[in-house]
Amino acid sequence: MAEATLTIIVPCYKEEAVLEKTNYILVELINQLIFTKKINFNSRILYVDDGSTDRTWRMIQQFSAEYQCVTGLKLSRNFGHQGALLSGLQVASEKSDCLVTIDADLQDDPAAIIAFVEAFNQGYEVVYGVRKKRVTDTFFKKNTALFFYEIMNWLGVELVPNHADFRLLSRQAAMQLLNFKERTMFIRGIVPLLGFSSTKVYYDRKKREAGESKYPLQKMIGFSIEGLTSFSIAPIKFILSLGMISLVVALIITIYSISRKVMGDTVSGWTSMMISLWILGGLQLISISIIGLYIGKIFMEVKHRPRFIIEQENFSASFDSIIETN
Ligand code: UDP
Ligand code: MG
């Protein structure tokens, strides 16, 4: 069997601090894989500049001029991690047999890609990179992540625990992923829905090499809510039963306060009135806001806006030159 064409997609948002090192390691890795005949030399690294305002795009262009296997794609503005990944997959799928996505900070061990490719060569269409332990993450990040998996699981969303966006997809799997047209895409929730034969590769997650996390608390909460509301209507059901219970409680309170009033005890009636007023008011507010989340989602989805806009890329052209020179 001929060796596969691999594309490593690297989303980059203001990553000038790590990119030099990342590129060095990834080019080495590609060369090693080619040398050991695991992939062929049409294999590429595709950096996706997600609207960085620092030197990231210039660095990508520079690497691309220097190494034949390095290509770049520039989004017209910041579309977020998921948008950057999708744009890379879209541009590279057709020309690749398999595609790996990895973060630019190399917190995920690039050496695991060797095992990814071996699994692909054995016939797996999806390979999940799974962290062994989250020792290097801060206490806060580790626990918020764990809490998130717990909640998602409890709501019946299938997620691979301790797997982020470090994975290999076959061309077929990537094409099918791109067929999911929702605008706000939570990729790691969709991939298990694709089906296909899959396996896991375990690795140690390291500290960020340099630069800082682009996922502060605020973005993490946003990301989690995104994941939740894209996949599950369980919160709505939960609120519904909460509402029913509160109706029963309200009924009891009504009977109670009426009987107190009949006995001439109006002061305590005021208390129960206040309590039920507040409980119901709170419940209504929560319910409305949750429904609002879903309506907001519908609003976003029906517009069918593009999930990313590519300003320029030289991935495709890097193949043309090969044909010409041959
Ligand atoms: N990233 C991106 N667009 C964004 C934010 C992040 O392309 O708007 C990229 C970033 O450059 C990195 C990856 O997504 O390659 C993961 O981001 P980060 O390492 O900051 O997140 P963390 O690992 O802390 O969750
Ligand atoms: Mg990171």
Image: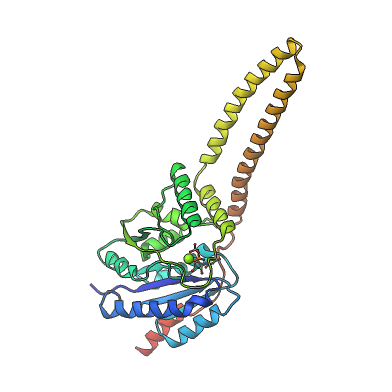
Q: Quadrant of residue 127?
A: bottom left
Q: Answer with left or right where residue 161 lies relative to residue 262.
A: left
Instruction: Count every numbered label the image shows and give the total.
Output: 0
- Which quadrant, please, contains the C terminus? bottom left
Q: Nearer the viewer, residue 181 or 136?
A: 136
Query: x and y percent of residue 238 in the render?
Result: 54, 36
- Vertical comparison of 150 with 200: above or below: above
> Residue at 49% across / 73% down in the picture?
210
Vertical arrangement, residue 234 with respect to residue 43, above or below: above
Which residue is more in the foreground, 109 or 291? 109
Residue depicted at 66% across the width and 36% down the height: 282
Residue 133 percent location from the top left of the image: 37, 58
Residue at x-position 51% and y-position 83%: 61
Q: Quadrant of residue 222?
A: bottom right
Indicate the position of residue 302 as horizontal and vertical percent values. 59, 53
- Decide if residue 316 is in sight here: no
Front residue of this view, candidates 133 and 311: 133
Colour scheme of the rendered structure? rainbow
Q: Residue at x 67, y 38 (%)?
A: 285
Q: Is residue 60 above or below residue 280?
A: below
Quadrant for the N terminus, please: bottom left
Q: Position of residue 291 (x, y in %)?
A: 61, 42
When asked about the image quadrant of residue 111, the answer is: bottom left
